[in-house]
Image: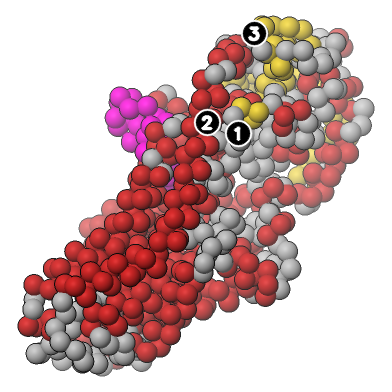
Amino acid sequence: MSKRRRNAAPSPDTGTSSIPGSAAAELPSAVNWERVCLALLALVPLLVTAWQLLPEFTTPVPASNDLALHWQMVQGASREMAHWRNPLDFWMPQLELGYPQFLYYQNLPHLVVAGVHRLLFGLVELRTVFDGARYLLLIGLPLTVYWSMRRMDFSVRAAAISAAATTLFANRDGYGLEYDGQLWLGRGLFTQLWAEHLSLIAMAGLYRLMRTGRGYAGTIAALAALALSHFIWSYMMAMTGVLLCVLLSTRDTWKANLLRLIIVGALAMAISAYMLIPFATSSGSYLAMFPGITAPDLDESRSLLSALQRLVIDEDRWPILTALSLMGGVAALVMRTRAARFALVGTLVWLLLYQFRPTEVNWLGRVLRYDGHLVYRFIGIADVFLLMLIGVGGEWIWRAMVDRRVGRVDAPATAAPRSLGAMLAATALLLAILSPAMRDRATFFGRDGRAMTATRAALAADPDLTTVLDTIAAQPGGRAYMGLASNGGKQWRIGPLIRAYDVLKDRGLPAVAPLFQGLSLNADMVVSFRDRDPAQYDLLDVRYVALPSGAPVDGFMTPLARTPRYTVYRVATTGMATYGAVVERHAAGAQLDLLRGVDQWSKSAGPAAKQFIRWDFRQPGGASMPTGACPGGGRTLSEHADAGIIDLVVACDSPSSLIIKTTYHPNWRVTVDGRPVSTYMVSPVFIGIDLPAGQHTIAARYTMATTKWMLLGMGLVVLVGVLVLRDRLDALPRRLVTSAT
């Protein structure tokens, strides 16, 4: 047998019989009609979804979920590109007193959106590009499902039926395939939407690679893009690759397939290493273990009932998709096709991993160097396999009506040639079966659109709010405050769902506001902000407060601007930096020790007295070296702050410590009068430097580590090498196959 013959995959089942003398052989034209009917079946739910979700594209309004964060990341990347600065790792001052979000969060989707906007030379607004990308990904997911399933040897029928069911999952949990998690009204999981597409593409590439030894370049590119778009989904895809290797290998090919998996995995990791390695080496220290990200409500009892509640794909409606998936499981056992078996085994494996997720011994967290329990996201890949089973189950119904058979694929048809009437009847039946789910989703999508429209109308009816934000944006430096969810800010509503502080966050202004994600080590300082204490305003440099007119005001607030509905107040602070006394020096070996110590300090007299603690965080402690306070408080003669750029001119008549009021990170570089100086962490988690007496010019810059540049260069070289040598990458695996046979 030739090498080409051994490595070639059998022709996938197209949904028509290839048996001589069968109906398909007698009426080849029926194939076209069948595809038309199946296309109709897939397009009806897609078009309903596209129409109902149109407001996601046409109605740009501020969000109160994760979309707010993703919008800020897109804005930041576009701004860095516009100023010819580094968009791969930069400082975001609006995130919890400042945070390098692109260092610790998957960001390829945001870079793509910002890059497209720059390539269009600003002719299309950035928000339009962002919402347009989201909309295309939402309505295009069924097409990706169809394409990937066809590449994995599923029949046209199964792929079309799965595509039809893609947008119909329903579970308010929002972490699976259900669109509850992707929309403005839901969780706003922008990067997961990218991950769903990329996971399907990567899975199809791995499947083809295991079967034929071809498709290295596309598979490696998809895996690398997935790693840069969603860490957890890329981890799940790595485990799925192992599953594919086990299921698709024979005694003669398992070595070759294992080597193929290692090759694509290693090269994909090399391409994405510029993101993964810096994340892994520093996330354990500077990625906050804040309760908002650990989702404690998801770490509840692992009882069978609680697991089943999260596995629901037909919440509050007839279990139509659930029944089709169960039927698909039975059909997979009867039909005995490789693709159906893969769907069944994949579903069972991921449901078991989800049910028995290790929360006490968090092995995924150990791999990611993060202690938050993130394995609840396994439900997403389980839903992908459930969707495949739904296609297999729907195909069984189609076969029963059109082919008059439900047995194995190679079982002969027992009736007359297929008729167009039978295919139309099968299409109508499947659409009728799916219609309650389509009606349910249309209702939910319509509610999403109406809420967005109502929010836009509320914003248009409140021009005073725009005036307030314009006034704050025009001020020189400082942070703004419009309340928190724990106090009166929650009652300041704009429309049915969002609050005034959501509009403030949408503008991208540095602020003390409800958390985006809480990844910054200073997130707890934001949550616990005491808005009646003037020392808190000075500590966090909160200079501007907006309140509804007539709201009670503290005496340290001075009116800055008034509108008929609102008033903007100014609070006097020492500015972006303050002189202070470092009175203690403590070591903190664990992040929890640091955060507890900062919390105790923030509730003491230290902030008001400008007495700070120096922290040796995860490094050897040094001797106590207290510094005295500056007599009279010192002076800030000028200041300028931008994303990752802080310029100051300060003066004090005696040596003292200067506290720069942004989150500490070792990537900050500070010079004093042009000479580099050492930085250290001071409470809460700010940047501290020691200054001699006199006037000094301070320049602080957030910079990307040199190692990240080196890793980026290596990744680009590897990517070019993969594209050039893609036809030669299978040489060693093929030799293994040849030697084994």
The part of the chain drawn in magenta is: 107-132
Between tags 3 and 2, which lies in front? 2
Tell me which amino acid carries mark 2: Ala
Closer to the chain start, of discs 3 and 2, is: 2
Q: Name the spot of residue 178 as percent of width and height, x first.
A: 49, 57
Query: Mark 1 — residue?
Result: 496
Q: As displayed, is residue 201 above or below residue 558?
A: below
Q: Choose the circle earlier in sequence order: 2 or 1.
A: 2
Residue 51 visible somewhere in the drawing: yes
Q: Residue furthest right?
A: 605
**Image quadrant of residue 630?**
top right
Cα separation, mark 2 vs mark 1, equals: 7 Å
Q: Main secondary structure of the magenta part?
A: helix
Image spot of residue 323 (x, y percent): 47, 75
- Residue at which label 2 appears: 454
Residue displayed at 52% across by 67% down: 318
Name the front one of labels 3 and 1.
1
Q: Secondary structure at mark 3?
A: loop
Characterize the local packing of mark 3: few (<14), some (14-19) or many (20 or more) Cα atoms within 10 angstroms. some
Relative to 267, 235 lies left or right: right
Which is more N-terminal, label 1 or label 3?
1
